Amino acid sequence: MDIEAFRKAGYQAIDRICDYFESLHSRPVVAQVDPGFLIDALPENAPEEGEDFSAIADDFQKLILPGITNWQHPNFFAFFPTANTFESVLGDLYSSSVSNPGFSWLASPACTELEQVVMDWTARLLGLSPHFLCASGTGGGAIQNSASEAFIVAAVAARARYMRENPNARMEELVLYTTTQTHSLGAKAGLVLGLEVRDLQVRAEDGFALRGAMVREAVEEDIARGKRPFLVVGTVGTTNTGAVDHVDEIGQVLKDYPSIWLHVDAAWAGICFVCPEYREQGQLAAINEYANSFCTNFHKWGLVNFDATALWVRQRHDLIDALDVTPAFLRTKQYDAGSAVDYRNWHLGLGRRFRSLKVWFVLRSYGVAGFRAHIRKGVALNDHFVALVRAAPEFEFAAAPVLALSVIRLKDPAGASAEAADALNRAFAARVAAANGRVFLTQSTLAGRTVLRFAIGAERTEVAHIEGAFEVIRGCAAEALKEFEAGGAEA
Ligand SMILES: *Cc1c(COP(=O)(O)O)cnc(C)c1O
């Protein structure tokens, strides 16, 4: 493709992307295709001769788009929505135009320095302590592929620090703490790093949040059996219910065990710290006081398209000492002088994408005011949803609504056994799942019971979508209840 052909195809691509966004509301939320639909439609081998690009572009419309689950759809309430923006799409476009792996300052000075700038901008915007700023010279932040990878990075740093401070420790004695509500990133890190993971049992009466006393009890028990707890992950805004672990209590306990690293995973909720009014609820003061590392995703609620995870550490040398691999061919004058950041030593890979560009575009285009307005709108929409649920006698909240997340289920029908009531909720969830062309929610379990999560955050969701979605949900509930009543207890 030459420059003029690219110009033409590029204009067409932007036009088609605009058409896609204009047509979003009329598309199904979840792709309505069966497994194998695309594999069957495509040839077994790559074409022998190059094809005309217009045919290729047309196949994106014809073959790919129908198989896309539309995360940008205003009726997308599953998992945690990703708030894509045109600014971040353009950021990715420019980034790919200068495609480079940015592993050292010299590999592309602007990639490294813009990342330092936006990580400091956002650290200040979230109200993180100055210790976490690149400008501090001791802490700093880096963009990672995902919150899961960010946790592996934190775990590697935590392990290296622990082994340095406890030279007699053996790797197989190490244990990391998660809770029964921690994201699967805890288990994943355990698998990848060959570490024992202990799931602490959080309780419904604590709102499924981890308490300091549970950590102390586990640490004492494990030390008594010759284990070495070295890392605790506290979650601010759990995936299941939005629960906030008691970072303040955990931090207090860990003062007695200074070799144990505290990682705070706020992949979804952390971004709401841009609004000062949510900082107390999210334990920001305790994070600033106690966390060794803190992570949040721009690519969920934070207006930047996938992927852009922000990870900050209080002590960059913990990270760099653990991850520094600098063979001769990667050494530069700046590295030797220690005068520049080489981001290869801040993440798992060597090369990395130029993602700070899209964060920069979004922050500048929205401004702090616009960014805050987006977060506040999500919370207000959830307040609206909560009011609708409260006014409908058949529903209850399985956990207290948090920010832009509600977890609901049908109340137990009078006289129904726990099993029958859960069968009713499974039937309800199955009906909602069958309506996934219109609305998309995630089914989950909480304390052994089936629940539905309703997560708000797509950039185009408005009050009308919340009301429309609630109508669909309520219709599914009515059908499930009718069937339950007709079938009696065996339903
Ligand atoms: C979504 C989520 C994650 C995982 O995020 P990835 O970036 O996809 O790895 C981790 N923790 C919490 C609390 C989440 O909500």
Image: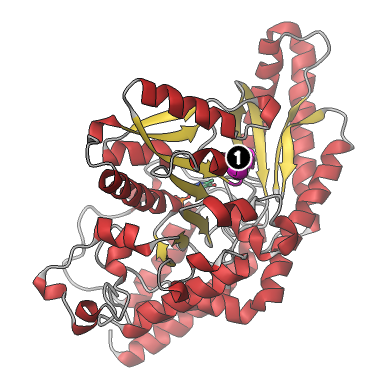
Q: What stretch is highlighted in magenta?
A: 236-249
Camera-nearest residue between 26 and 212: 212
Please give the name of the residue rendered at 38% of the width and 74% of the height, measured from the top-left corner: 354
> Is residue 92 in view from this perspective?
no
Pinpoint residue 270: horizontal percent, then vertical percent. Answer: 59, 56
Pinpoint residue 125: horizontal percent, then vertical percent. Answer: 61, 70
Pinpoint residue 190: horizontal percent, then vertical percent. Answer: 34, 37
Query: Which amino acid is tagged 1?
Result: Glu
Task: Check the picture and name the quadrant holding the N terminus.
Answer: bottom left
Please give the name of the residue rendered at 34% of the width and 20% of the height, measured from the top-left corner: 225
Main secondary structure along the magenta-highlighted residues? loop
Drawn side of residue 121 relative to residue 386, left or right: left
* Residue found at the very far left of the displayed protein: 328
Q: Say whether residue 257 is magenta.
A: no
- Circle 1 is placed at which residue position? 249
* Residue found at the very far bottom of the displayed protein: 4
Q: Residues within 10 Å of mark 1 (few under 14, many from 20)?
A: some
Pinpoint residue 332: horizontal percent, then vertical percent. Answer: 18, 80
Drawn side of residue 215 relative to residue 323, left or right: right
Task: Check the picture and name the quadrant holding the C terminus.
Answer: top right
Please give the name of the residue rendered at 70% of the width and 68% of the height, measured from the top-left corner: 372
